[in-house]
Image (cartoon, grey):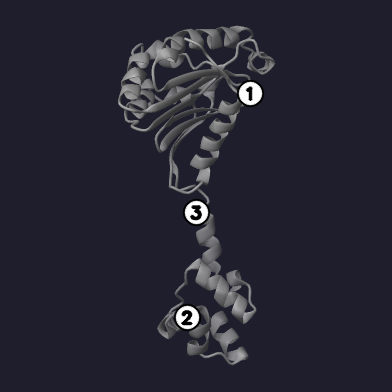
Amino acid sequence: MANERLRAVLAAGGWTHADLANVVEVDPKSVERWVNLGRTPRRSTALKAAETLGEDVHALWPQLRQARSARAVSPELVALYEQRADIPVSAFVNLLSQARRRIDILVYGAVFLHEAYPRLNELLRERAGEGCVIRIAVGDAGHANVQQRGQEERFGHGIESRCRLALMHYRPLATVSGIEIRTHGTTLYNSLYRADDEMLVNSHVWGVNAYAAPVWHLRSSGSRGMFGTYAESFDRVWETAQPVEG
């Protein structure tokens, strides 16, 4: 189907296909396809053409608005789970097992990992022994933010106990080369489990225990993206956290 709007704009301005092609640096046949076949150029080319013609790019190519909406879901999103409880612990274990360069874990307690997989410390030792850099940040049970979370989730002192239990589980790793354990008192918006270029993000919802909150599985695209946003967030928390001695 021809692009009658584009045809009319070119005619009104006295533009030939070759004229527009020269300005936007494409082959004249491309412009001919835009006009006669209704083809849609790349977004950058369309923006340049619309600016040249003094038109709104979406008026010339409404498909671009639709394409933008279709890409609203990040290409880094591998999967979305309604709640953490829907994910088998084996998914976390497999993720960490595949790491070759880096493992980052940011939680308050997350003792479900050790409870369901008692070999977790052994796995982390093995990864560190293969050259993987491992950083684990657990909640500081004495910090007001952690205690506040317990009140918000109607979990009382339970979350403080879980932070202490998590630290008890991880503390033996503090003396392992390549592994560093820290405690933090930040307001935790998400628990993060990163292995190289993949990450499980357990979002926290006010008044809801973490096991009942959503999780998204991300895979880095190489640009900043969602993955980069959460990776940077981990780094900022890590800078505020306190080292744990073995």
Residue drawn 31% across the image and 20% down it: 126
> What percent of the width, then of the height, locates residue 118?
36, 11
Quadrant (top left, top right, bottom left, bottom right) of the N terminus: bottom left
Establish if 175 lies above or below 41: above
Q: Is residue 55 left or right of residue 191?
A: right
Q: Amino acid at mark 3?
A: Arg
> What percent of the width, then of the height, locates residue 44?
52, 68
Residue 204 visible in rendering: no
Residue drawn 60% across the image and 14% down it: 140
Establish if 174 lies above or below 49: above
Q: Is residue 171 left or right of residue 159?
A: left
Residue drawn 39% across the image and 16% down it: 176
Q: Amino acid at mark 2?
A: Ala
Distance between the alpha carbons at the discs numbered 3 and 1: 33 Å
> What percent of the width, then of the height, locates residue 220?
43, 43
Residue positioned most to the bottom: 14
Distance between the alpha carbons at the discs numbered 2 and 3: 25 Å
Question: Which of pointers 2 and 3 lies earlier in the amino acid sequence?
Answer: 2
Q: Amino acid at mark 1?
A: Thr
Question: Which of pointers 2 and 1 lies earlier in the amino acid sequence?
Answer: 2
Circle 1 residue: 186
Q: Are marks 2 and 3 in contact (CB under 8 Å)?
A: no
Which numbered marker is on residue 71? 3
Q: Are marks 3 and 1 in contact (CB under 8 Å)?
A: no
Q: Residues within 10 Å of mark 1 (few under 14, many from 20)?
A: some
